Image (spheres, rainbow, N blue to C red):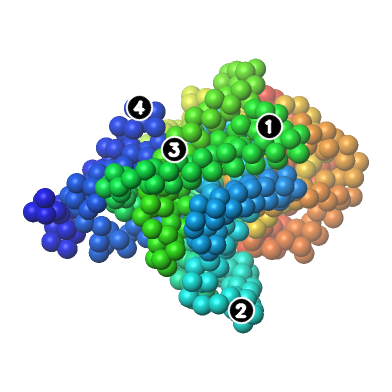
Amino acid sequence: MDSFVISISTEPVLTFGLLLLIILVVPILFQKIRLPGIVGLLLAGTFVGPKGLGFIEAAGVIDVLGKVGLLYLMFLAGLEINLSQFKKDRNNTLVFGALTFLIPQISGTLIFIWIGYSVPASILIASMFASHTLVAYPIISRLGLNKEKSVTTAVGGTIITDTVALLVLAVVARSVDGDLDTLFWVTLIGLFALYLVFMFVIFPKMSFSFFQYMGEKGRFTYVYVIGMMLMCSWLAEVIGIEAIVGAFLAGLALNPLLSNKGPLKNRVEFFGDAFFIPLFLIFVGMQVDVQVLTSGYEVWFIMGVMTAIVVVSKWVAAFTSSKLLGFSNDQAWVIFGLTNSQAAATLAATFIGMEVGLIGEEILNGAIMMILVTCIIGPMVVEKFGLKLTDDTLELETDTKIRQRLLVPLANPVTSARLIEFASNLKTDDKSPIFPLAVINTFKDEDKQRERAHKTLEVAKGHIHAVNSQANPVVETNLNIAEGIRNAAANNAITDIVIGWNGVISTPMRIFGSILDQVLLTTKQQTYICKITKPVSTFNKIVVVMNPQSYSGRNSLALLESLFKLAENLKTGLEILYFEQDESKLNRDLYLIQSEQEMSLRSVRSIEDIINIVLNDLSESDLLVMVNSRSGKSDWFRTSNVIPSIISTQKPDLSFVTAFPASLDKEDYLTDILYSN
């Protein structure tokens, strides 16, 4: 058999080729039999590894990439945590987080001490049961249950139980090397406190400055993110805790800077899902010794005990917390399905325990069996009971709603990246396409104009694909650019228009200049006029200014809902400025939207108050959104339209958007334009 062993050092091309084929083929085959791809990759690693058929060595580069894959997996877990939901449901989260850690940890420790393992080994093994991985979360996203209370409780509990379990792991691993004396605890707590200051104060500010400086240069920002993730993991090891804790905390620290629909997060997730994490899973499978399974009933006993403890203890934690929090049985089953699956932290604890000599191969095989069983049970339970939580009527209404379709007129390829990222973060549906538009407005040198338009659209398509959206490029030929935009919007059933503004008012026309004012005059779609001076992912806060006419009708409510979605996807705070007399109307609209987004409310008395806030309180890292209307029958409309001019002249580095709800009536805007001349 040795003659057939492929080594990365002697056959690097063949080895990587085979590994990539495994990464490609195995998950597809397992999807056909309705099993998670993670299970297939683990089994494939066992099959081809040195302790299986022995085709591929688990050494050298494969060993390194496998360990990096583990860090990458923990980093992504930190990135996926919804921090605003965690803060909002913190009481539910604390209750569930405590129970889902303590019940498996205590029961697992006692049972393995009874079996005959040492106290440190028993605590370490039990930490595997206490942690969990949200393997079934993609099913929740597909069912549209992301904001369901049981789901947010389970996701928030993940922060608590995984972090504490990893800290327990770090302490146990250190205890093997020496006594846990007072000096150890003082040193660990002191260094860990300094590490947290660096991770959540210095590191985010440093990253924010870097992102602002580099802008949309994706290659450099990606390298920065992955490089800093590895450095943070190394620093964690330096102060005496495990690298996976550092990777997880790095994900939490960078969480606000990677927007949900931004190109950087898409790149991070894509490269991890396509390369690092599958290699890690294959590497884990390679550690399994199949011959151990035939060595006696003791091995099967350990595997059965480990699997039973994690399933039973996670079930007890889910149903106990659900009873305390008033959740239904269906919600309890969803919590159990989400938190039953084991993966990243379990494998980390196993490897660390073997490295320090606390556990043997029987625990490794038990951990692999536990992962296989729980990764099958979890998604099946979430699928079954998640469907029960999905209201059939609401699901039907969602399916019959007009699908969001965003049009982004482009003139300058340099500014297209920010407009497209802004548009992608407005999306309420991942399947919604983005239509980049180029308008050819001359018959002279039409061929050159068309060639330039296609180049602009090719650049835009790259940006759209980078944010994981569908691109439907459109070219319009019209001497009047505004009319070309209107025709494109009408011909493609557009619901939202996102268009840029350079801050220059080119004519005596009322607000922005000739073309943009004509677009507002001739279209009825929800429209965003954007002057974005900073990378979209670096906004710390969105300040929305409501006008007195913005509390009337379905279209205005839809615009407000889109702004909440924008804040949610950008992971920013939201501040709403409103006139005192409109407080009851605003509260009614907020009740109808029922958003989980973190926000604050601030009342004003006059347009002068708003201008003072804009000029004196807002910083370059804030995004101002002025909610306007196309109606000219109000003092607000005429006075608020001077704000874009004030900002562009007195505060040119401030990013701002003027948002107009959809409208079926265009005469009011035309009337106001005529009044202004």
Q: Evaluate if marks 3 and 4 touch, with contact meaning CB atoms under 8 Å apart.
A: no
Q: Please state which of residues 588 and 582 is positioned toward the viewer in this rendering.
A: 588
Rendered location of residue 470, percent (x, y): 43, 35
Assess disc 3: are there few (<14), some (14-19) or many (≥20) residues with their C-alpha within 10 Å of its C-alpha. some
Q: Residue at point 64% right, 21% down?
A: 391
Give the residue pinned by disc 1: 558
Instruction: Give the number of the mark in front: 3 or 4.
Output: 3
Of the two numbered discs 2 and 1 on the same chain, state the one appearing first in sequence. 2
Disc 2 is placed on an element classified as loop
The residue shown at (61%, 79%) is 181
Check disc 3 and give the amino acid type: Val
- Mark 2 vs mark 1, foreground winner is 2
Mark nearer the N terminus (2 vs 4): 4
Q: Which residue is mark 3?
A: 373
Marks 2 & 3, CB-CB < 8 Å contact:
no
Label placed on residue 33: 4
